[in-house]
Image (cartoon, helix red, strand yellow):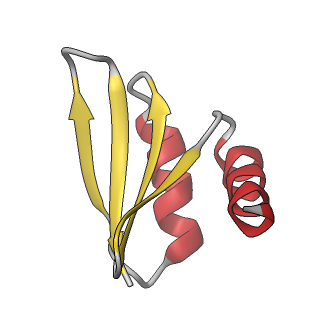
Amino acid sequence: MAKKASIENTLSTISGVEVEVTIARKNCITLSFEGKNEVAAKKIQDYFAPKQLEYDYDEECDFTCLYMNL
């Protein structure tokens, strides 16, 4: 869990929003944060470049998710 917290802290610092990391399945992680902040999402995507992350904003619950296949 220390590695997960370290990754969350790093991504939160880079993006400027509090990021939560969830292991969705064996080869996929979800990076999520409250609200719609396309600048923060872009900063996270740029951090992992050239890896492409799938972006989704759920307006109903006001949450942004970025999905990355490993």
On screen, residue 41 above or below 60: below
Q: Quadrant of residue 56?
A: top left
Which residue is depicted at the point 38% across and 85% down?
70
On screen, residue 21 above or below 19: below
In the rendered view of the protein, which quadrant contains the N terminus?
A: bottom right
45 sits to left or right of 27: right
Q: Nearer the viewer, residue 36 or 27?
A: 27
Circle count: 0
Which residue is depicted at the point 52% across and 67% down?
46
Counting from the top left corner in percent of width and height, residue 23 is at: 43, 63
On screen, residue 10 above or below 53: above
Which residue is depicted at the point 33% across and 75% down?
52
Which residue is depicted at the point 69% across and 37% down?
16
64 sits to left or right of 3: left
Counting from the top left corner in percent of width and height, residue 3 is at: 75, 69
Counting from the top left corner in percent of width and height, residue 21 is at: 54, 53
Q: Nearer the viewer, residue 30 or 26?
A: 26
Counting from the top left corner in percent of width and height, residue 10 is at: 76, 57
